[in-house]
Image: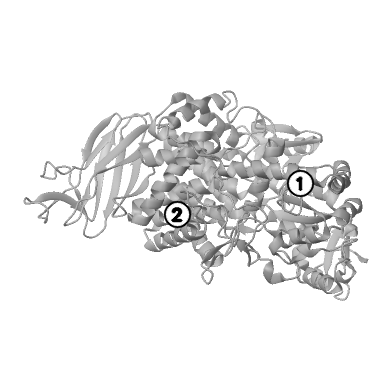
């Protein structure tokens, strides 16, 4: 099957004879040309010849892609089989297309087959950059013994969790009910009704080879008992999504949660106590938002400690840039090496907010380096931002980031900055990673450059483009621009927003697309896609003041309210289905029309908890609130009120599972503190900027305000005791305020002429304060015949860093 071509120089695919070539893999100095015609269906799979021919043809059409996916993934001599995943468009699923297992993608047809063939369903959920997913694939899913066990009694199903977060979140809940914890891969065995008989994460080959026949035997001898137990697990999972909400909202719950959070955080190393340590961006944003309104020295120091350790130790890649997904120890020294787009995006938001409050120049350095890294390594022109960078390099987990000690000694010998280099040992190996005690010191640049040069190529990038995650990155870039003024950040945020709308909004179906890969789109969008992208479009509206982004946000909200609504002030994770529960009795496996992709084998559910990403319902609450503030739309206002009550009740019950909701509820109840804000139902826009020459001198404050035509603000002395004057106040240290020159106007609702501000104008002030200070701008906006309600807008003046 394999023809070997000696490689004296690099052989290109085009140089391999066409009649033998579908895939060229290099190994040991040789190019192996693999003929698609020799690829066989998985053993005992009973695949029709026509299907196999289609698979082989698809393999040949994807030869360049498959070369990139498999060259560093598996030995070419081990590729003998092909399965139906070759028709998919996910890099993760395509890697499994050459397993000797008859994998199928997630569909309702799977459960019809299971019923008709009297088999169980083996469900495996993972993602490209998941270390233990890759380990399990190499150990078990390329093993003919495991393949045989699955073929005998199971329908095998593979899911890319990043493509189907609804499936992933549901079976994550199954895992949490069964084990009390969760992680990836997810390995679940289901009956034909979709109820879980067994759930685990990573399973070594010896355990899997014992488990598969054992469960099959038990189902044949004790089916009633097994199915009863499975239904009980399903009932517990459904209870998680239908749990009775708290009857009352305690207005002090935000304060009590803040106090409880301080007890959960590690006072020595930061982050939640114990290991592993994740960035927990929702928690950090909640804490930072609380600090914006009620400063707490203890909480501030705990947040700063975590931010410092994340950026100055091994979780941040000081050589190449970017945050690793998490660390496995409690000292921030042993990273899990994959890099996820969502971490880069969410941490851009975190460090931008932290810089807004504390003005630490190291936060600014992180923001700028994250932008450089993400735009250079995770961005595709005309596509958007890619999903992740794999941990594996040259078959070694973390191989791109670690070195043999002697190699490091040799590299560092001639550099004075070697004294700034810190090392950590990778357990179970003779490898060391590096980080710098002064990570952004220019003195390190030559050494960093040398370390980069000593690595050929790079780890594999999953070039799938996910709508939701791009929404996060657009948001992160917009936040970064607001504190840096870097026009490149603004431009990339805007261009990415245009790209995702162009590529991922299906105008004919009036739906968002979940993801794309190499120009092909996959799956309908989920709640997180709509909510994250709508939130991003509101940010772009702030940057551009172009109402097209407001209209697009409104369109996304309209789709969600039509197809995702759960009728209780919240939304389902996935869009409208023809039925909410699987009913195999009414389906015919031989009639494709009866097997609709709009059906699910699990109950469509509402998801409120934050995970590694923010809960879609919480982000949608934020969207509704900000959209209502800009438009005053009555329907949006009604949905906002209902949704706010629902989210409040879930936060009251489980605050630490809903900290992004806590952040949003703080903004709603106490006002936002961003530097750019719309006010008066979108009739006005204000941008706050300040400058400090030093901590010994006053800060110069500037508020640039724009009002729409036909609207004005009462001046600081409006000439009417019943109208609210424009007034700027500061917690402490206000020296003076220079209000703009007002205009005198005679309006229909007032007998006397009034003093007002119109069009574009500035309020200037000075304040002598070195602590974090809250600024409040009180104002009232009126038209010729009506006045809107008085309003207070909050801003933060950062701590002065001497």
Distance from disc 2 to disc 1, alpha carbons, whole Å, reads 60 Å
Query: Relative to 626, does residue 262 appear above or below in the rendering?
Result: above
Secondary structure of the residue carrying tag 1 is helix
Q: Which numbered disc, 2 or 1, marks the residue that appears first in the sequence?
A: 1
Between residues 296 and 201, which one lies in front from this camera angle? 201
Image quadrant where residue 450 sits: top right
Q: Label 1, on which residue?
A: 227
Residue at the (22%, 56%) spot, across then down? 711
Quarter occupied by the C terminus: top left
Image quadrant where residue 52 sits: bottom right
Q: Is residue 53 left or right of residue 163?
A: right
Between residues 582 and 538, which one lies in front from this camera angle? 582
**Residue 552 image position (x, y, % from top left):** 44, 62
Query: Relative to 397, does residue 269 appear above or below in the rendering?
Result: above
Q: Label 2, on which residue?
A: 487
Crowdedness of circle 1 by 10 Å Cα count: few (<14), some, many (20+)? some
Residue at the outermost bottom position? 19
Secondary structure of the residue carrying tag 2 is helix
Image quadrant where residue 107 sits: bottom right
Between residues 532 and 440, which one lies in front from this camera angle? 532
Crowdedness of circle 2 by 10 Å Cα count: few (<14), some, many (20+)? few
**Residue 558 image position (x, y, % from top left):** 45, 60
> Disc 2 vs disc 1: which is toward the camera?
1
Residue at the (39%, 30%) spot, across then down? 294
């Amino acid at each position: 099957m394999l023809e070997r071509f000696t490689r004296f120089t690099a052989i290109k695919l085009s140089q391999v004879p066409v009649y033998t070539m579908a895939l060229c893999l290099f190994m040991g100095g040789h190019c192996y040309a693999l003929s698609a015609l020799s690829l066989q269906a998985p053993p005992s799979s009973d695949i029709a010849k026509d299907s196999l021919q289609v698979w082989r043809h698809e393999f040949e059409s994807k030869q360049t892609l498959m070369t990139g996916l498999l060259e560093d993934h598996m030995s070419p001599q081990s590729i003998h089989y092909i399965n139906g995943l070759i028709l998919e468009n996910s890099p993760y699923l395509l890697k499994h297309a050459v397993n000797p297992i008859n994998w199928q993608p997630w569909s309702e047809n799977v459960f019809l087959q299971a019923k008709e063939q009297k088999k169980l369903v083996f469900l495996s959920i993972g993602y490209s950059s998941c270390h233990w997913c890759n380990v399990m694939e190499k150990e078990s899913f390329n093993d003919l013994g495991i393949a045989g066990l699955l073929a005998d009694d199971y329908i095998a199903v593979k899911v890319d969790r990043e493509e189907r977060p609804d499936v992933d979140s549901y079976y994550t809940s199954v895992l949490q009910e069964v084990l009390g914890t969760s992680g990836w891969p997810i390995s679940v065995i289901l009956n034909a009704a979709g109820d879980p008989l067994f759930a685990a994460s990573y399973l070594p080959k010896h355990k899997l080879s014992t488990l598969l026949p054992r469960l099959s035997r038990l189902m044949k001898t004790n089916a009633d008992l097994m199915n009863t137990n499975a239904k009980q697990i399903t009932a517990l999972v459904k209870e998680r999504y239908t749990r009775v909400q708290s009857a009352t909202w305690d207005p002090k719950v935000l304060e009590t949660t803040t106090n409880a959070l301080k007890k959960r955080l590690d006072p020595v190393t930061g982050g939640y106590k114990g290991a592993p340590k994740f960035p927990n961006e929702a928690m950090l944003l909640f804490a930072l938002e609380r600090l914006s309104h009620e400063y707490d020295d203890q909480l501030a120091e705990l947040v700063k400690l975590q931010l410092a350790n994340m950026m100055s130790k091994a979780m941040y890649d000081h050589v190449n840039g970017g945050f690793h997904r998490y660390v496995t120890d409690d000292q921030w020294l042993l990273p899990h090496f994959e890099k996820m787009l969502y971490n880069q995006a969410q941490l851009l938001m975190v460090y931008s907010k932290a810089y807004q409050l504390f003005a630490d120049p190291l936060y600014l350095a992180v923001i700028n380096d994250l932008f450089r890294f993400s735009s250079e390594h995770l961005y595709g022109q005309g596509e958007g931002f890619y999903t992740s960078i794999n941990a594996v390099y040259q078959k070694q987990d973390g191989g791109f980031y670690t070195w043999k000690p002697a190699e490091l000694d040799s590299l560092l010998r001639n550099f004075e900055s070697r004294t700034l280099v810190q090392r950590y040992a990778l357990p179970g190996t003779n490898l060391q990673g590096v980080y710098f005690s002064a990570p952004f010191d220019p003195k390190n640049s030559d050494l960093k450059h040398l370390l980069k040069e000593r690595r050929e190529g790079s780890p594999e990038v999953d070039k799938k483009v996910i709508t939701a995650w791009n929404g996060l990155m657009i948001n992160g870039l917009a936040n970064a621009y607001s504190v840096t003024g870097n026009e490149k950040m603004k431009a990339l945020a805007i261009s990415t927003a245009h790209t995702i709308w162009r590529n991922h909004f299906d105008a004919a179906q009036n739906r968002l697309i979940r993801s794309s890969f190499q120009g092909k789109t996959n799956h309908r969008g989920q709640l997180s896609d709509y909510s994250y992208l709508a939130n991003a479009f509101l940010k772009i509206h702030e940057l551009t003041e172009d109402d097209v982004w407001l209209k697009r946000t409104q369109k996304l909200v309209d789709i969600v309210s039509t197809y995702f609504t759960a009728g209780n002030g919240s939304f389902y994770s996935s869009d409208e289905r023809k039925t909410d529960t699987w009913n195999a009795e009414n389906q015919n496996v031989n009639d494709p029309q009866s097997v609709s992709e709009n059906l699910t084998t699990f109950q469509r559910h509402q998801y409120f908890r934050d995970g590694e990403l923010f809960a879609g319902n919480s982000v949608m609450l934020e969207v509704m609130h900000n959209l209502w503030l800009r438009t005053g739309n009555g329907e949006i206002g009604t949905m906002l009120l209902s949704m706010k009550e629902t989210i409040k009740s879930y936060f009251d019950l489980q605050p630490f599972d809903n900290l992004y909701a806590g952040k949003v509820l703080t903004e709603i109840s106490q006002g936002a503190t961003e530097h750019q804000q719309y006010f008066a139902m979108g009739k006005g826009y204000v941008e706050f900027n300040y400058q400090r020459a030093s901590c010994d001198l006053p800060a110069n404050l500037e508020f640039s305000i724009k009002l729409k035509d036909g609207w004005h603000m009462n001046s600081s002395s409006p000439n009417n005791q019943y109208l609210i004057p424009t007034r700027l106040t500061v917690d402490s240290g206000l020296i003076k305020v220079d209000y703009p020159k007002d205009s005198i106007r005679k309006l229909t609702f007032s007998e006397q002429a009034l003093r007002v501000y119109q069009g574009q104008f500035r309020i200037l002030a000075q304040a002598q304060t070195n602590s974090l200070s809250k600024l409040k701008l009180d104002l009232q906006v009126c038209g010729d015949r009506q006045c809107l309600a008085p309003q207070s807008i909050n801003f933060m003046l950062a701590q002065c860093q001497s």
